[in-house]
Image (cartoon, rainbow, N blue to C red):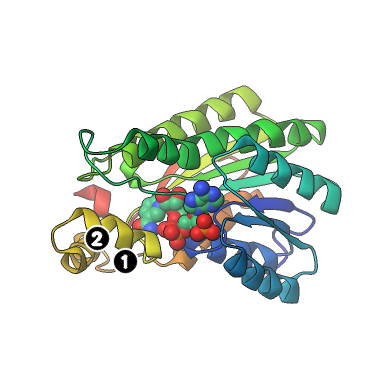
Amino acid sequence: MGALKDRVIIVTGATSGMGRAMAKTFAEEGASLVIAGRNRERGESLLAELQQIHPNSALVCGDIGTPDTNKELVETAVDRFGKLDTIVANAGVLGLGEVTSLSIESWHETLNTNLSSLFYLAKYALPHMLKNKFGIVLANASIAAFKAFPKHPAYCASKAAQVALIKQMAKDYGPLVRANAICPGPVDTPLIWDSAKAFEFPQEAVAQAAEATLVQRLGTPDDIAKLALFLLSENASFITGSTINIDGGIMVG
Ligand SMILES: NC(=O)c1ccc[n+]([C@@H]2O[C@H](COP(=O)([O-])OP(=O)(O)OC[C@H]3O[C@@H](n4cnc5c(N)ncnc54)[C@H](OP(=O)(O)O)[C@@H]3O)[C@@H](O)[C@H]2O)c1
């Protein structure tokens, strides 16, 4: 307990799945949190839980694919908690469809939500990190950065670009700032069940994904939260510019 004491952390996509698990884990470790999502009801429910763990928690609701929401997140952190040292860009959508069937709107929505959001959040957050000579940027990417999935072109492209952007920031802003990407395999959240709609038999597709791991199960949001906690902690001070698969070994093939 206390690994993140005195830290101020923004977590996007905290209203569901892995983001929710990360926010709770970080609060339990003493961090002040600004959580984000579009769904106010789920956001307020998490906020109430977080405030039971740690009094310093705030919620910002809005579309993370726009500069304004990211600006508001950063301003909320600094205004409410006096500084900002860590951002976790976790929000994501799938934008299902092959290149020929995917609408241009869906392409842009997916790129904005998954990729531009990382750029916007980092753009507004980095000056505060540099001012205080300490910062951590963490992106929740995916093994889809390295592997094609049927009908996921916008998703795979956005995840690969997230990894490239993380490496770029690690280079440009080290040694003061560390930047890393987590690349989960199949994790049991609402998103994997949406992803499975790209397959003829969605239930079977999720079961097959679990069987394709070397540990014969889906990941849990807590599995990912534990890795994120490690990467945000001082124990990971030599890790930057890295992409870390957390996939039950599925990428071994
Ligand atoms: N589940 C998997 O198997 C898997 C595998 C690899 C990587 N990932 C990645 O892990 C991350 C978390 O996904 P998850 O599996 O935990 O999915 P999830 O349960 O569906 O959560 C997605 C989160 O993103 C938020 N979000 C989506 N679009 C948004 C927008 N335009 N503006 C603001 N917030 C938005 C959602 O908030 P609202 O609902 O409130 O809008 C929600 O909190 C994603 O980046 C995903 O690509 C997932």
Q: Nearer the viewer, residue 239 or 182?
A: 182
Residue 186 horizontal side relative to residue 75, left or right: left
Tell me if residue 159 comes above or below residue 229 in the rendering: above
- Looking at the image, which residue is at 35% across and 41% down? 155
- Looking at the image, which residue is at 70% across and 34% down? 124
Mark 2 or mark 1, which has the lower sequence index?
A: 2
Q: Could you say which quadrant of the image residue 68 lies in? A: top right
The reply to whether the residue tagged 1 has its Cβ within 8 angstroms of ligand 1 is: yes
- Looking at the image, which residue is at 22% across and 60% down? 209
Element at badge 1? loop
Name the spot of residue 12 as percent of width and height, x first. Answer: 58, 51
Q: Nearer the viewer, residue 30 or 214?
A: 30
The residue lying furthest to the left in this view is: 200
Q: Nearer the viewer, residue 55 or 244?
A: 55
Name the spot of residue 159 as percent of width and height, x first. Answer: 39, 39
From the image, tell me which residue sits under label 1: 218
- Looking at the image, which residue is at 24% across and 68% down? 216
Q: Residues within 10 Å of mark 1 (few under 14, many from 20)?
A: many
Tell me if residue 2 comes above or below residue 168 in the rendering: below
Residue 56 horizontal side relative to residue 45, left or right: right
Q: Disc 1 residue type? A: Leu
Q: Which mark is residue 213?
A: 2
Name the spot of residue 185 as percent of width and height, x first. Answer: 33, 54
Q: CA distance from mark 2 to mark 1?
A: 8 Å
Q: Disc 2 residue type? A: Thr
